[in-house]
Amino acid sequence: MKPDQASTGFPRIPGVTYTGFKTTRYLFNYGPNFYKTGIPTINPPLFAPPYQDNPANGPIYPSFVPKTDADGNDIAGIRLPEVQVPLATYTGWALRAAPHNDDGCEAAGQYIPFPKTKVDRIESADPRLSIEERYGNFETYAARFEQAVNDLVRRGILLPFDAERMLKKNLEDVRKRNLFSKK
């Protein structure tokens, strides 16, 4: 998938700049036979400043990313319970705008919390549903999270021992964060 916002389906979250995943990485020249033999004859490879988009450094390899759901969470792969029953948008990238871009922290990831209430969502113009709108209360969230954990066990992806620990830790952490209104 092309790394542009329209192709991926990543939502326009207030305060989150979608950079297009532009990260400069070159196909370095380690010598004419490196990709056949694995033996570099030019090491380290030659490259020249400036590193950004410099044709002298050779071609830049393309970056491809997975499509996302309406919350901005990746669709591809095994969707862990935290992504199936989300409280936030979780990304595997954290690109920054210049002058701090290409600082090597591209894969640090982000946790972009959902608004807590519908009022918060409307006031912030966040397109993602609030925690309140999604689950209503902690009990509903906990039941859905437990169902997601049990589904991974049923599919043979998660061991029962790990499922118990995952469920206990998540529900304790969520309860401590006081994300649900007391009604």
Image: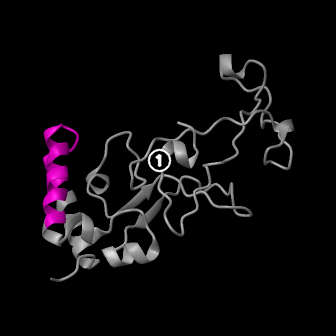
Q: Which colour scheme is used?
A: one colour
Indicate the position of residue 173 as horizontal and vertical percent values: 26, 71
Please name the residue shown 43% across and 63% down the image. 111
Total numbered badges shown on the rendered structure? 1
Inspect the magenta stretch and tell me whether residue 145 lies in it: yes
Q: Quadrant for residue 166, please give it.
A: bottom left
Q: Quadrant for residue 119, please give it.
A: bottom left
Out of 36 and 176, give the one closest to the viewer: 176
> Does residue 133 lie above or below 49 as drawn?
below
Q: In which quarter of the image is the C terminus?
A: bottom left
* Disc 1, SS: loop
> Does residue 162 lie above or below 128 as drawn?
above
Q: Residue furthest bottom?
A: 182
Indicate the position of residue 122 as horizontal and vertical percent values: 39, 74
> Does residue 11 lie above or below 1 as drawn?
below
Along the horizontal axis of the image, is 54 left or right of 150?
right
- What residue range appears in magenta? 140-163
Residue 28 in sight: yes
Please name the residue shown 16% across and 45% down the image. 151
Inspect the magenta stretch and tell me whether residue 29 lies in it: no
Please, what is the three-letter code of the amino acid marked with disc 1?
Answer: Gly
Residue 165 in sight: no
Q: Main secondary structure of the magenta part?
A: helix
Q: How crowded is mark 1: few (under 14 residues within 10 Å), some or many (20 or more)?
A: some
Q: Quadrant for residue 131, please give it.
A: bottom left
Indicate the position of residue 175 as horizontal and vertical percent values: 22, 75
Please name the residue shown 71% across and 22% down the image. 34
Please name the residue shown 67% across and 16% down the image. 36
Along the horizontal axis of the image, is 31 left or right of 77?
right
The residue pinned by badge 1 equals 9
Out of 182 and 125, give the one closest to the viewer: 125
